[in-house]
């Protein structure tokens, strides 16, 4: 079986502990308005025009985004940096897009990693069937689990989907005793409200397992050019920049509730 | 730093680099006097040494703790006319050139015009060398196929071991007398040579004692007129030190440092050896003195720091002697390559990091001087704390210390046949060269232009830049049906040029052993005294000659591009590519874009390119490694460029990797500038595919922006990168931590960035002192950004 992968990046050091290789799956159930990886949304191979510059001249070329690869082919890339992940207590992170949209392929790939004693992390939006999470949980050492908006109506508005299943899956993984770090995209006007943070805290405190740590991801407008090249309308262009005082305030709220914000 | 050190440092920083005629005049007078006619060559050189140290002007600056200058004052730099005499035109160039200039006063120019040039013209080592080289050598040398290190400077390339911390010059003289007494004039056919060499050594040992005595006398005189009581006591104490060392072994840290400094002056005044000289494992040598001084209350941590700082400044006062022509291009810097080693292993194989290792790191950070260079020897047995300490200095963008793999160096040295204890006492010196300190002569002989060999191969033996045939006919490329055909022809060309270089080396070595022995340096390196043999004659316990390969990235990418576009995808024919190269890609911009952006590139951990690097590396190794020289040395390979990738670039036409004619080649084993797109782990994996244990050093440059070092996470990740590269037998890694913005601003406003020191290639230099092409290159080297999955 083959998986649809849009990139494999080496030396990622912010997607879990140590030096990691991050495998980006193509295809995502959500359409977050601030998405930084618009090329990861569509679960098909797409064509993208890239330009190279040489001595002031521009050369354009169409390249395709997304590759169908077997688990062995992906693992071959992961294997290249095993020495670095061993030395740094790092590993591999499956991100996207949404890796859980390809659960059978993901499971096969993770099994290969575990056979080779590689630490595995899944970076997920939480929007997949509980059975899928159950099936890969045993192979996963760490979940980076996105929580965006606790208010379901607002969640639908900014991601296109309900948050009900996301919250259920989080409870499930917590009950299974999995290691979880919550990732909270701090988007001014969309997720940054004190009300949202309060609700999130109260939800997290009620989780059956250990209280997870939280990582705040402040919004950066880096993706304009990507949207432009993909001819996707960039709905993020209206989002204002993060106010650092607001961000600090949010961190404090979490800390006060005993939820440690990490960098 | 305290006021005294601040003042001394300012004197050093503001002193003008200038030519001093003092040494040239003293030795010209000696040679012209006719005294030498009745002397053997070693004795002549010993008497030259004597004349210099007896006649030279002494220099003791206010507040100095470590004394002695090679010139009459800081940065007044002597020349060595017995090796190479500078013409009036050379002096004008040195005086006026934009980079690495030396001011020449009217008085100096006059001395050259009237005394120095008339005596030495036609009699120098350089004249002898050019006279002895054959046509093939001259043609290849002129074409930029290789450089010649011993053309304007002497072989040196060695580092002091622990001898001076155990023995005074009087003890060494005793050893010489024992060796002299052992000479068998009845049966040993070399008895005369040995005796003359040993007698010459004996003279130079006495010279150093007397030179220290002269300084002691001057210190006493200064003390008499010194109004400040504290300084007066200091001067008297220093006089006492100069009467003790170098005659006797040191018993305090201050004595040890002063002894080393006298020895340093001796070595760099006797001749102008490459990689000036250096104390090597300073934290190891000084530790016993430091500990006993602290215990006895003679020293505090602060006064030890001050002494080390004073010692550091002495190095900075001594720029490399002026270089001109190709020698200036291959190594265009004031740096004289004293690379102080910190950390590593003890001779018994245990972790050598100690309190002084950290104190020396403080000194490096605070002094922020061009010289000396510094490096961390990192063994798997050393703690992370010392790496983190080093990285905190590196992140300031100073380019020092660089980091070396101790375990790898030891394996390289033992592969070459050294005893493990000698290997563990060694380290790296110069740029990145591995050596057994105190026991080895490891002479760099010249850079070797690997891409140029490919260029000659693609032109069937002819140099496209000059139209001159310099290599054998190995077939027109249109007859090459597969890449192996290219490689087979390349191998023949490579052997041809390596043979020319080695033949030249073996003659040049003789010129030094016959005409320019170094009895003083021979005192210091085992086993010159025991064997009664000069350092330049093979007296050292181990003797190695290096040829340094340059442009591995450029040649790898060129071969990969040919394989990919000509033989695999068949997008271009060989003749189309050759046509494009001939016209420097004019009208072939689209092809050049393909070659640059859509070809496999070295440094991305992809075998499509990396296999060619391995192949070229192995061919180069096979052509060089183990080939003997007359003094019993063996040739080995290194992969380092200093600034030679710029010079070789000027001598190399357009290449199939899309590089334009005349632009820099890749440096060391680093990827072609900007072509590593898979991040640092991929670069390190590629680099580690070369069997670096079979070299005597490789150079790998990685540029990071300061942002990368800002948090603990980044520091840990970089530590892991280094540790992993070393686990894979990587030899050396250096970091340029600076952002391109700053560098561009420095180009526009050099006046605002006079303190900006960047890592060039195995050494650091002032950014302002680099040529614009090199400045551009440093700016363009890939900046690895802090990659996140956003």
Image (cartoon, coloured by chain):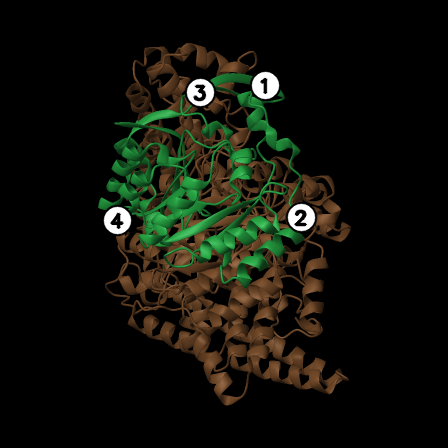
Query: Mark 2 falls within which chain?
Result: A
Q: Is residue B419 above or below residue A171?
A: below
Q: Secondary structure at mark 3?
A: strand
Q: Which chain is green?
A: A
Contact, CB < 8 Å: mark 4 with mark 2?
no
Q: Secondary structure at mark 1?
A: strand
Q: Is residue A85 above or below residue B292?
A: above
Rendered location of residue B59, percent (x, y): 67, 69
Question: Gap between marks 1 and 2, in whole Å?
Answer: 37 Å
Quick one: label 1 or label 3, which is nearer the N terminus? 3
Left or right of residue B301, residue B317 in this image? right
Quick one: label 1 or label 2, which is nearer the N terminus? 1
Pointer 3: what residue?
A46
Query: Mark 1 falls within which chain?
Result: A
Callouts 1 and 2 on one subunit: yes
| Mark 3 surroundings within 10 Å by alpha-carbon count, few (fewer than 14), some (14 through 19), many (20 or more) | some
| Mark 4 surroundings within 10 Å by alpha-carbon count, few (fewer than 14), some (14 through 19), many (20 or more) | few
Q: Is residue B679 above or below residue B10?
A: above
Rendered location of residue B785, percent (x, y): 53, 42
Pointer 4: what residue?
A117
Query: Mark 3 falls within which chain?
Result: A
Disc 1 versus disc 2: nearer the observer: 2
Q: Secondary structure at mark 2?
A: loop
Pointer 2: what residue?
A243
Callouts 4 and 3 on one subunit: yes
Question: Gap between marks 4 and 3, in whole Å?
Answer: 34 Å
Question: Gap between marks 1 and 3, in whole Å?
Answer: 22 Å
Question: Gap between marks 1 and 4, in whole Å?
Answer: 46 Å
Quick one: label 4 or label 2, which is nearer the N terminus? 4
Residue B121 visible to the viewer: yes
């Amino acid at each position: 079986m083959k998986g649809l992968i849009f990139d494999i990046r080496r030396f990622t050091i912010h997607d879990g502990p140590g030096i990691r290789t991050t495998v980006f799956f193509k295809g995502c159930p959500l359409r977050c308005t601030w998405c930084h990886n618009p090329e990861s949304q569509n679960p098909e191979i797409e064509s993208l025009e890239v330009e190279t510059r040489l001595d002031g001249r521009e050369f354009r070329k169409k390249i395709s985004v997304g590759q169908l690869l077997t688990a062995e082919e992906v693992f071959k890339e992961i294997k290249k940096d095993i020495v670095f992940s061993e030395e740094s207590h790092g590993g591999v992170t499956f991100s996207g897009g949404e890796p859980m949209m390809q659960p059978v392929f993901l499971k096969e790939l993770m099994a290969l990693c575990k056979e080779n004693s590689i630490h595995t992390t899944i970076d997920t939006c939480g929007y997949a069937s509980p059975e899928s999470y159950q099936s890969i949980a045993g192979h996963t050492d760490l979940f980076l689990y996105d929580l965006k908006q606790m208010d379901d109506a607002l969640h639908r508005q900014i991601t296109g989907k309900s948050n009900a299943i996301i919250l259920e899956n989080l409870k499930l993984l917590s009950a299974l005793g999995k290691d979880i770090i919550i990732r909270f995209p701090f988007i001014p006007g969309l997720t940054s409200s004190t009300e949202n943070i309060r609700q999130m805290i109260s939800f997290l405190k009620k989780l059956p397992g250990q209280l997870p740590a939280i990582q705040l991801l402040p919004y950066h407008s880096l993706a304009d050019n990507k949207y432009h090249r993909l001819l996707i309308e960039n709905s993020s262009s209206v989002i204002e920049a993060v106010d650092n005082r607001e961000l600090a305030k949010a961190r404090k709220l979490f800390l006060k509730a005993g939820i440690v914000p990490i960098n | 730093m305290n006021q005294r050190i601040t003042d001394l440092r300012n004197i050093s920083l503001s002193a003008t680099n200038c030519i001093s005629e003092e040494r040239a005049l003293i030795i010209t007078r000696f040679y012209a006097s006719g005294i030498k006619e009745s002397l053997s060559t070693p004795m002549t050189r010993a008497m030259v040494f004597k004349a210099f140290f007896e006649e030279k002007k002494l220099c003791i600056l206010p507040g100095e703790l470590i004394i002695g200058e090679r010139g009459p004052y800081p940065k007044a730099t002597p020349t060595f006319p017995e090796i190479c005499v500078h013409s009036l035109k050379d002096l004008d160039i040195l005086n006026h050139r934009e980079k690495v200039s030396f001011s020449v006063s009217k008085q100096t120019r006059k001395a050259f015009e009237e005394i120095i040039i008339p005596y030495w013209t036609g009699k120098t080592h350089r004249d002898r060398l050019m006279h002895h080289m054959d046509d093939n050598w001259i043609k290849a040398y002129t074409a930029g196929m290789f450089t010649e290190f011993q053309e304007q400077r002497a072989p040196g390339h060695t580092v002091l071991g622990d001898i001076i911390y155990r023995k005074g010059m009087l003890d060494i003289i005793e050893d010489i007398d024992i060796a002299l007494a052992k000479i068998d004039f009845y049966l040993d056919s070399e008895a005369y040579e040995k005796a003359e060499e040993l007698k010459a050594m004996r003279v130079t040992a006495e010279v150093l004692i007397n030179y220290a005595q002269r300084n002691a006398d001057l210190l006493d005189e200064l003390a008499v007129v010194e109004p400040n009581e504290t300084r007066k006591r200091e001067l008297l104490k220093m006089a006492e030190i100069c009467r003790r060392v170098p005659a006797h072994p040191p018993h305090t840290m201050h004595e040890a440092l002063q002894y080393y400094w006298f020895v340093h002056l001796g070595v760099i005044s006797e001749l102008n050896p490459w990689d000036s000289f250096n104390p090597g494992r300073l934290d190891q040598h000084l530790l016993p003195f430091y500990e006993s001084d602290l215990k006895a209350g003679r020293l505090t941590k602060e006064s030890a720091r001050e002494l080390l700082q004073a010692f550091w400044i002495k190095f900075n006062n001594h720029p490399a002697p002026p270089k001109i022509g190709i020698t200036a291009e291959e190594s265009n810097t004031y740096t004289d390559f004293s690379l102080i080693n910190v950390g590593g292993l003890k001779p018994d194989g245990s972790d050598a990091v100690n309190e002084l290792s950290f104190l020396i790191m403080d000194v490096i950070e605070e002094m922020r001087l061009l010289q000396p260079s510094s490096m961390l020897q990192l063994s798997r047995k050393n703690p992370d704390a010392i790496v983190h300490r080093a990285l905190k200095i590196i992140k300031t963008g100073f380019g020092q210390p660089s980091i070396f793999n101790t375990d790898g160096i030891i394996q390289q040295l033992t592969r070459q046949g050294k005893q493990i204890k000698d290997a563990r006492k060694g380290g790296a010196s110069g740029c990145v060269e591995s050596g057994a300190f105190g026991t080895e002569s490891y002479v760099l002989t010249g850079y070797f232009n690997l891409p140029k060999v490919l260029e000659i191969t693609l032109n069937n033996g002819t140099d496209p830049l000059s139209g001159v045939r310099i290599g054998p006919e190995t077939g027109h490329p249109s007859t090459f049906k597969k890449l192996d055909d290219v490689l087979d022809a390349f191998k023949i060309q490579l052997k041809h040029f390596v043979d020319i270089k080695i033949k030249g080396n073996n003659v040049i070595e003789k010129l030094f052993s016959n005409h320019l022995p170094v009895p003083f340096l021979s005192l210091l390196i085992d086993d010159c005294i025991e064997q009664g043999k000069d350092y330049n004659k093979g007296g050292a316990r181990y003797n190695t000659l290096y040829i340094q390969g340059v442009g591995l990235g450029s040649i790898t990418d060129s071969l990969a591009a040919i394989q990919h576009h000509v033989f695999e995808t068949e997008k271009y024919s060989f003749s189309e590519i050759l046509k494009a190269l001939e016209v420097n890609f004019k009208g072939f911009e689209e092809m050049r874009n393909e070659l640059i952006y859509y070809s496999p590139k070295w440094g991305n951990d992809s075998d499509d390119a990396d296999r060619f690097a391995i192949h070229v590396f192995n061919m180069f190794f096979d052509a060089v490694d183990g080939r003997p020289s007359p003094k019993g040395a063996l040739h080995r390979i290194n992969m380092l460029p200093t600034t030679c990738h710029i010079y070789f670039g000027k001598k190399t036409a357009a290449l199939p990797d899309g590089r334009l004619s005349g632009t820099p080649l890749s440096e060391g084993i680093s990827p072609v500038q900007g072509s590593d797109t898979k991040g640092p782990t991929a670069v390190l994996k590629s680099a580690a595919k070369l069997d670096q244990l079979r070299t005597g050093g490789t150079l790998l440059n990685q540029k990071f922006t300061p942002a990368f070092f800002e948090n603990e996470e980044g520091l840990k990740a970089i530590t892991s990168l280094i540790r992993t590269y070393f686990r894979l037998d990587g030899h050396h890694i250096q970091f340029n931590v600076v952002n391109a913005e700053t560098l561009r601003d420095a180009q526009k406003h050099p006046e605002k960035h006079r303190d900006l020191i960047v890592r060039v290639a195995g050494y650091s230099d002032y950014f302002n002192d680099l040529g614009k092409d090199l400045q551009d290159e440093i700016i363009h080297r890939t900046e690895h950004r802090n990659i996140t999955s956003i």
